[in-house]
Image: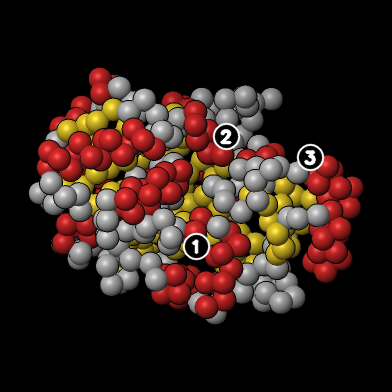
């Protein structure tokens, strides 16, 4: 099997996808814009060959790279980046080289357009926030009369809460339209809830081989725009209602042979048309692993190896390994360099003791959302999680 991994060096932990593929007997080929010399030694060992392009944004260069690999190794069986930013590039290459193990260009929209997602959520029987495309100020004002303030304005094709705005009054709305971005935007009614996810891997039949759930209590939009402390935790087990919503979503979208990251709101207060407090409401679909170090957190909290599970799906279309270890709450605290905390990161790690799992730096490209300083730990109780979070973000006087 010939597998082309797009940008295998970023984020750095993605090298484990390539390593596990190689361990499963897959011929792994890489295309990226990073110089070969700076690749992690383990990644170099996992790749049969690496083709460097000046820019992955230059489609002609990636086409030439794929053509070279085809001429040297034969038909390419898979193309994947597992990276939101390159999903459309992945789809275009599959289309041009007739690769049938993933989404092609005519299929990718339902996973990239937030408006298109609504139709499939309805098919899954899940409520979702009312919305309207951003067109004219008059249409926006009319939507505000129906939905009420606050209103969330977000890119139709966007990642996380980047370039997302909370409009709290008519003046905010008018200001937004006065500087309206050129690319398509949506306006949605505001939903009060914590974000809970259904993360995992499904095979070619859409069967879930592995699943977990993580919970973000603070608003992701406020983390990005207001610098609110960034923290979330992987639950010990997947709640039954989250599993039901997740599987219904996968079925509605026809998802297969993918790592998936599905986001839902758990309402913190009743919302007319959506449900009562505690109910699950659809938010967003992502057909790739959750960002940052979340795959590693799934491993820590679930005593698993999601890189191996994904590689087993690719090579065998089934789970070839079992994971029976204990489950724990795995919490992430992302601290920002412009804050002066009571404890330095090494001091926090020492204070955390045997519960500590990973204390490091976040790549600058992801730090705006995730924070600069990474602190990940595992605990048996939510009380311990809360105490860790309090300690991690305590500011010096």
Relative to the observer, which residue lies in front, 360 or 265? 265
The percent coordinates of residue 179 (x first, y second) are: 78, 40
Q: Earlier in the sequence, mark 2 or mark 1?
A: 1
> Is residue 352 left or right of 320 when viewed as pictured?
right
- The answer to whether marks 2 and 3 mark residues whose Cβ atoms lie closer than 8 Å is no
- Please tell me which of labels 1 and 3 falls first in the chain: 1
Other residues around mark 3 within 10 Å, as few (<14) / some (14–19) / many (≥20): few
**Residue situated in front as seen by the camera: 184 or 327:** 184
Mark 1: give few (<14), some (14-19) or many (20+) Cα within 10 Å.
some
Residue 149 seen in the figure: no
As rendered, which of 322 and 50 lies closer to the eye?
50
In this view, the residue farthest toward the right is 171
Give the answer, above or below, for where 277 lies relative to 72: below
Note whether 57 is above or below 278 in the view shown.
above
- Classify residue 225 by image quadrant: top right
Q: Which x, y percent locates residue 55? A: 40, 29
């Amino acid at each position: 099997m010939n597998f082309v991994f797009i940008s295998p060096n970023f984020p750095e932990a993605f090298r484990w996808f390539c390593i596990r593929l190689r361990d499963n007997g897959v011929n792994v080929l890489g295309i990226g814009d990073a110089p070969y010399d700076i690749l992690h030694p383990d990644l170099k060992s996992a790749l049969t060959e690496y083709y460097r392009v000046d820019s992955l944004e230059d489609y002609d260069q990636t086409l030439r790279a794929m053509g070279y690999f085809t001429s040297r190794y034969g038909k390419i069986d898979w193309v994947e980046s597992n990276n939101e930013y390159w999903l459309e590039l992945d789809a275009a290459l599959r289309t041009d080289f007739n690769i049938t193990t993933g989404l092609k260009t005519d299929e990718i929209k339902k996973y990239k357009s937030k408006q298109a997602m609504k139709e499939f959520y309805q098919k899954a029987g899940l409520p979702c926030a009312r919305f309207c495309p951003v067109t004219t100020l008059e249409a926006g004002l009319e939507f505000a009369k129906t939905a009420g303030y606050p209103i969330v304005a977000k890119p139709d094709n966007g990642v996380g809460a980047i370039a997302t705005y909370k409009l709290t009054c008519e003046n905010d709305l008018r200001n937004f339209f006065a500087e309206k971005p050129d690319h398509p935007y949506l306006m949605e009614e505001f939903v009060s809830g914590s974000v809970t996810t259904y993360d995992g891997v499904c095979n070619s039949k859409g069967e879930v081989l592995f699943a977990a759930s993580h919970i973000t209590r603070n608003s992701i939009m406020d983390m990005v725009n207001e610098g609110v402390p960034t923290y979330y935790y992987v639950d010990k087990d997947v709640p039954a209602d989250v599993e039901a919503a997740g599987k219904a979503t996968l079925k509605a979208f026809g998802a297969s042979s993918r790592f998936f990251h599905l986001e839902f709101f758990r309402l913190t207060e009743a919302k007319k048309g959506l449900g009562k407090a505690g109910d699950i409401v659809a938010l967003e679909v992502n057909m790739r692993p959750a960002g940052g170090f979340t795959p590693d957190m799934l491993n820590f909290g679930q005593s698993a190896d999601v890189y191996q599970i994904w590689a087993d799906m690719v090579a065998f279309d089934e789970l070839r390994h079992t994971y029976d270890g204990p489950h724990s709450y795995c919490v992430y605290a992302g601290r920002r360099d412009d804050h002066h905390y009571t404890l330095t990161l090494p001091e926090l790690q020492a204070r955390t003791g045997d519960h500590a799992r990973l204390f490091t730096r976040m790549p600058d490209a992801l730090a705006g959302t995730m924070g600069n300083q990474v602190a990940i730990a595992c605990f048996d109780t939510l009380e311990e999680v809360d105490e860790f979070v309090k300690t991690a973000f305590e500011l010096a006087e």
